[in-house]
Image: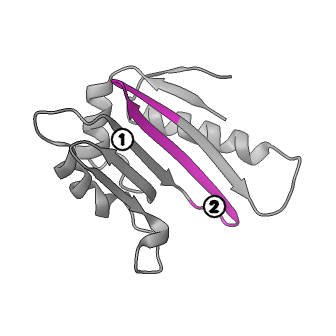
Amino acid sequence: MLSLTIADVKGFMGKLLKSDCFDTFELHSLSIHSFAIFEVNKFHVEHEASPMWVDVRPFAFEVVKGGKQPRFIKVVLGSPDGETARFMNITFEEGKVTITNGLSQKGFTLDKSAHHTWDDEILQFLASKKIEYTNELL
């Protein structure tokens, strides 16, 4: 499991909210705490397929843009892989952005290779998008 702190918060938030950088991911949930609380949860979406980040991103940007910085943002993006659910949790709080990841497999296994592969894929993705970070956990 990764726990990353993003070095350039403003640049990262621009990539997240204003560019197509994360558009290939599914959206699992979104919570923005500003003048009001704006939430999207895939389990309450009225169609069967999970919404893609590209579909919700413009709405998230509209809520965030303006003069006052939100108090809190949490975006949970996913990347399905067969019977494995892979998550990237992006949290903005107190001027800091952190990324943690997770993986949920059907059935019990002691094999952690899928976890390590997902960690590597996230690190490669961030490198390809020129997103700098510090790794809090190894």
Residue shown at 50% from the left, 34% from the top: 99
Disc 1 is placed on an element classified as strand
For the record, the magenta segment spans 80-99
In this view of the protein, which residue sits in the foreground, 29 or 88? 29
Question: Which residue is at the far front?
Answer: 36
- Going by the numbered disc 2, the residue's amino acid type is Asp
Disc 2 is placed on an element classified as loop
In the rendered image, the quadrant that contains the N terminus is top right
What predominant SS class does the magenta segment belong to? strand
Residue shown at 54% from the left, 33% from the top: 123
In the picture of the structure, the residue carrying the numbered disc 2 is: 81
Q: From the viewer's perspective, is 83 left or right of 5?
A: right
In the picture of the structure, the residue carrying the numbered disc 1 is: 73
Question: Which residue is at the far right?
Answer: 110
Q: From the viewer's perspective, is 120 left or right of 9?
A: right
Residue shown at 80% from the left, 43% from the top: 112
Going from N to C along the chain, the mark reached first, 2 or 1, is 1
Residue shown at 59% from the left, 41% from the top: 101
Q: Nearer the viewer, mark 2 or mark 1?
A: 1
